[in-house]
C-alpha cells in the first residue's frame, strides 16, 4: 500500500516538472507568439471569403505571378550556385595572383541591394546611356535600327541583377564548408591522382552540399522578397501583386490571400532545404589543419582571376563607381532633405538592431538554461521570420494592428465618447515590429553561436559565487559575447537600411528613408538624384561585410 502511495506522488511530480516551466520559457514563448502573430493572420486569410478582386486576380494576373516567380527562382538559383560554389572553391583551395583580396571582395555585392543595381545598369545600358552611346560613336551607328542590344528591362535582366547580389549567400556558406573540410579527405583524393577540379566534384562538393543548399534557399527567399527590381523592370511577381493590391486597390483581404499564396512557395523551399539535410549524413573526420592549396599555372591563374573578378566587378565595382560619379556630378541631394532621410534610416536601423540583439540574447540564454522541447519550439518559431518576404510580413502586421486600433477606438467612443483614430497603424512602432519579425533570425544566429562557445562550467562557477541566472548573463556572459553581439546588431542594422517592401507599405506618413527615396527617384527616372542616398546605403553595408569576411578568414 505504501509502495502504491509513494508511486502516485512521484508520477505526479514528474508530470509537474515536465509541464512547469521557468520564467525564461515563458519569456521565449511570449516572444515567439508575438513574432508569429503577423504570419498567423496571413495564413488565416486563406479561409476568408473571396472577393471579386481576388477572382479578378486569379483570372488575369495570378498565372503571370506564378510563372514569373518560378522562372526567377530557376534562373537565380542556377546562377548563384554556379558563381557562389565555383568562386568559393577557387579562392579557398587554389592559390593565384589576387586570391587573398578576392576572398573578401567576393562578399562586397552583399552590401548592395538588387534594386540599386537595377537602377544603375538601366541608366548605363539604355539608349542614351554611356554604353550604347560609346558603341554608336565607335562603329558609326546612327539609330537603334542599325544594331541589336539586349533589353535589360525584362525578366532576364531582373534575374541577372538578383543573382549578382545574391550569389554571396552561396559563396559564404560554401567557403565556410570548404574551410571546415578535413585535410585527410582532400589529401587522399590528391594521392589518388585527382586534379583540383576532380577533387572538387568527387570529394569537396558532396561534403559541402548541405551548406550549399542552405545558401541557395536563402537566395531564393530573397528573390521572392524583392520588390524594387522586379517592379522597375515591369516583371509581375507575387511581391508586386501584393503591393499593388494593397495600396493600389485598397483590398486587404485579396492582398493577404496573395501573401498566403506566396508563403506556400516559401514553405516549400524550407521543407526542401530541411529534407535535403536530413536525407543523408555528411561527415568529415581527420585533421582540420590548413590545407596546402592547389598551385595553378600561369594560364589557369589568369582564368581563375577573371572568373572571380567578374562577379565582383558586375555586382559591386561598376555600379558603385557609376553611382559615385553621378553623386559627384550632382551634389544637390546633399541638402537638409538628404540628412533627414539618413537620420530616419539611422534611427530605424539602430533601434531595431538594439532591440533584436536584446531579444536574441534572452532567447539564446533561455534556451541554454531550459533546453526543453517547448523552448526549442519557441526559438524556432521566433526565428522563422527571415524566411518570410517583407511584403508578406507587412500585410500580416497591418491587419492585426488595424484591428487593434479599431477595437480601441470603438471602446473609447462607447466609454468616453472620444475617437482615438489610428494609434498604431502607420507608426514607427509598427514598422520596427515588422523589422523584428523579418530580421530576428539574423540577430539570433551570431548571438547563439557566441553563447555556445562559453563553457557551461562558467555558469556553475557563477552560481557557486551566489549569482543568479540574470546576474550571470549580464556580468559573465555578456562581456564574453561582445563580438557576437556586435556582429548581430550590425547585420540587422544593414538589413534594415536596405529593406524596401515592408518599409514601403508600413512607413508613417511623410516619413521616408534612404531606401524609399531611392525607390521614388528611380521610379521617376531621376537616377542622378537617387545616386547619393543609394551610395550611402552601399557604404553602410560594406562595414559588416568586411568584418564578416575577416572573421571567416580567421575561423580555421
Image (cartoon, rainbow, N blue to C red):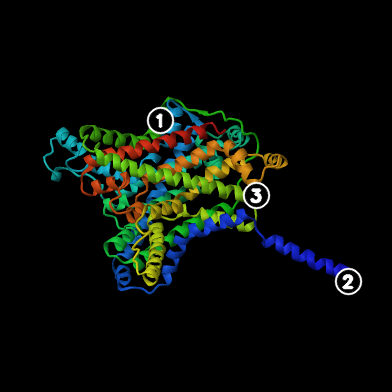
Count neighbours of disc 1 (C-alpha within 10 A) and say few if under 14, some if 14 to 19, many if 20 or more. some
**Is the residue under label 3 in contact with that under label 1 (CB below 8 Å)?**
no
Instruction: Give me the disc on residue 1.
Output: 2
Q: Secondary structure at mark 2?
A: loop
Identified at 34% across, 61% down, the residue is 422
Name the residue nearer the viewer: 36 or 115. 36
Compared across the picture, whether 366 is left or right of 77 comes to right
Residue designated by label 1: 305
- Residue 417: give x, y in percent of width and height: 35, 70
Residue 167 appearing in the image: no
Report how far apart the C-alphas of labels 2 and 3 lie in the structure.
Answer: 38 Å
Report how far apart the C-alphas of labels 1 and 3 lie in the structure.
Answer: 48 Å
Which quarter of the picture shows residue 65?
bottom left
- Residue 124: give x, y in percent of width and height: 23, 39
Name the residue nearer the viewer: 382 or 334. 334
Identified at 87% across, 67% down, the residue is 3
Please tell me whether residue 279 is drawn above or below residue 457 in the rendered image.
below
**Is the residue under label 3 in contact with that under label 2 (CB below 8 Å)?**
no
Q: Secondary structure at mark 3?
A: helix
| Image quarter in which the N terminus is found | bottom right
Residue designated by label 3: 369
Report how far apart the C-alphas of labels 2 and 1 lie in the structure.
Answer: 82 Å
Amino acid at each position: 500500500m505504501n509502495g502504491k502511495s509513494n508511486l502516485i506522488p512521484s508520477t505526479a511530480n514528474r508530470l509537474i516538472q515536465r509541464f512547469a516551466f521557468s520564467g525564461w520559457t515563458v519569456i521565449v514563448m511570449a516572444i515567439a507568439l508575438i513574432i508569429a502573430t503577423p504570419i498567423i493572420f496571413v495564413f488565416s486569410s486563406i479561409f476568408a471569403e473571396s472577393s471579386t478582386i481576388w477572382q479578378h486576380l486569379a483570372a488575369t494576373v495570378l498565372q503571370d505571378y506564378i510563372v514569373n516567380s518560378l522562372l526567377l527562382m530557376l534562373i537565380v538559383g542556377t546562377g548563384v550556385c554556379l558563381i557562389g560554389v565555383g568562386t568559393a572553391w577557387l579562392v579557398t583551395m587554389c592559390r593565384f595572383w589576387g586570391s587573398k583580396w578576392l576572398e573578401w571582395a567576393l562578399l562586397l555585392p552583399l552590401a548592395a541591394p538588387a534594386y540599386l543595381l537595377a537602377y544603375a545598369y538601366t541608366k548605363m545600358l539604355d539608349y542614351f546611356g554611356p554604353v550604347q552611346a560609346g558603341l554608336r560613336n565607335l562603329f558609326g551607328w546612327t539609330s537603334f535600327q542599325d544594331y541589336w542590344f539586349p533589353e535589360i528591362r525584362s525578366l532576364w535582366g531582373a534575374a541577372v541583377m538578383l543573382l549578382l547580389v545574391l550569389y554571396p549567400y552561396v559563396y559564404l556558406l560554401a567557403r565556410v564548408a570548404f574551410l571546415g573540410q578535413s585535410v585527410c579527405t582532400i589529401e587522399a583524393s590528391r594521392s589518388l591522382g585527382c586534379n583540383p577540379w576532380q577533387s572538387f566534384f568527387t570529394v569537396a562538393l558532396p561534403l559541402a552540399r548541405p551548406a550549399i543548399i542552405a545558401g541557395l534557399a536563402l537566395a531564393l527567399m530573397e528573390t521572392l522578397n524583392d520588390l524594387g527590381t522586379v517592379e522597375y523592370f515591369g516583371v509581375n511577381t507575387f511581391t508586386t501583386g501584393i503591393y499593388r493590391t494593397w495600396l493600389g486597390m485598397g483590398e486587404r483581404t485579396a492582398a493577404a490571400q496573395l501573401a498566403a499564396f506566396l508563403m506556400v512557395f516559401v514553405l516549400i523551399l524550407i521543407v526542401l532545404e530541411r529534407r535535403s539535410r536530413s536525407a543523408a549524413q555528411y561527415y568529415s573526420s581527420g585533421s582540420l589543419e590548413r590545407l596546402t592549396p592547389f598551385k595553378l599555372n600561369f594560364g589557369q591563374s589568369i582564368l581563375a582571376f577573371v572568373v572571380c573578378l567578374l562577379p565582383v566587378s558586375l555586382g559591386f565595382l561598376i555600379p558603385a563607381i557609376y553611382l559615385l560619379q553621378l553623386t559627384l556630378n550632382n551634389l544637390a541631394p546633399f541638402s537638409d532633405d538628404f540628412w533627414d532621410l539618413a537620420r530616419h534610416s539611422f534611427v530605424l536601423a539602430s533601434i531595431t538592431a538594439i532591440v533584436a540583439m536584446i531579444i536574441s540574447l534572452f532567447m539564446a540564454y533561455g534556451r541554454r538554461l531550459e533546453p526543453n522541447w517547448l523552448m526549442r519550439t519557441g526559438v524556432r518559431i521566433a526565428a522563422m521570420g527571415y524566411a518570410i518576404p517583407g511584403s508578406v510580413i507587412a500585410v500580416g502586421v497591418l491587419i492585426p494592428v488595424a484591428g487593434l486600433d479599431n477595437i480601441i477606438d470603438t471602446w473609447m467612443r462607447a466609454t468616453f465618447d472620444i475617437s482615438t483614430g489610428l494609434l498604431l497603424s502607420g507608426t514607427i512602432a509598427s514598422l520596427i515590429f515588422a523589422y523584428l519579425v523579418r530580421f530576428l533570425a539574423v540577430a539570433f544566429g551570431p548571438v547563439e553561436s557566441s553563447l555556445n562557445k562559453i563553457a557551461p562550467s562558467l555558469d556553475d562557477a557563477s552560481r557557486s559565487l551566489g549569482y543568479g541566472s540574470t546576474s550571470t548573463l549580464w556580468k559573465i556572459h555578456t562581456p564574453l559575447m561582445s563580438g557576437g553581439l556586435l556582429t548581430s546588431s550590425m547585420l540587422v542594422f544593414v538589413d534594415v537600411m536596405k529593406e524596401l517592401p515592408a518599409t514601403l507599405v508600413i512607413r508613417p506618413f511623410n516619413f521616408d528613408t534612404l531606401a524609399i527615396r531611392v525607390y521614388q527617384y528611380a521610379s521617376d527616372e531621376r537616377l542622378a538624384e537617387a545616386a547619393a542616398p543609394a551610395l550611402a546605403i552601399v557604404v553602410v553595408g560594406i562595414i559588416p561585410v568586411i568584418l564578416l569576411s575577416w572573421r571567416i578568414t580567421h575561423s580555421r
